[in-house]
Structures are given as structure tokens and as C-alpha cells.
Image (cartoon, rainbow, N blue to C red):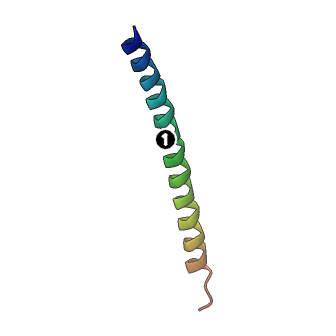
Amino acid sequence: MADAEREQQRLKEETRNERKMWWWLGYFLFGIHIVAFVMIYAVTHAPK
């Protein structure tokens, strides 16, 4: 019985960690795009 509870707890923990990882990845990719757009803007609007 204790093994099943421990497995359930581990699965819950793993799911939570996975969800955190996906949020982190999403924010990271969003941030990379913001940086890229700012750099593109800077390059295209730089004084000649």
C-alpha cells in the first residue's frame, strides 16, 4: 500500500515539475523572440 502511495506522490511531483519546465520553456522562447525583434528594429533603424 505504501509503495502505491509513494508512486502516486512521485507522479504528482513529476507532473508539477514537467508543468514548471514547460512554463519556463515558454517564457524563455517568448523572451528570445522579444530580444530578436528589438535587435532587428535596432539594426533596421540605425543611422546610416
Q: In this view, does 7 lie above or below 47?
A: above
Q: How crowded is mark 1: few (under 14 residues within 10 Å), some or many (20 or more)?
A: few
Residue sitting at 42 percent across and 25 percent down? 10
Residue 46 percent coordinates (x, y): 61, 85
Residue sitting at 55 percent across and 53 percent down? 30
| Residue furthest out toward the left | 3
Where's the N terminus, which quadrant? top left
The residue nearer to you, when weighing 7 against 36, is 7
Three-letter amino acid code at the position of disc 1: Trp
| Residue furthest out toward the top | 1
Q: In the image, is 31 to the left or to the right of 4?
A: right
Identify the residue position indicated by label 1 in the image. 22
Residue 32 percent coordinates (x, y): 52, 60
Residue 31 percent coordinates (x, y): 56, 58
Q: Is residue 28 above or below residue 19?
A: below
Q: In the image, is 36 to the left or to the right of 47?
A: left
Q: Is residue 48 above or below residue 2?
A: below
| Residue furthest out toward the bottom | 48
The residue nearer to you, when weighing 14 against 45, is 14
Where's the C terminus, which quadrant? bottom right
Residue sitting at 53 percent across and 66 percent down? 36
Secondary element at tag 1: helix
Q: In the image, is 20 to the left or to the right of 7?
A: right
Quarter of the rendering containing residue 5: top left
The residue nearer to you, when weighing 43 against 24, is 24
The residue nearer to you, when weighing 48 against 37, is 37
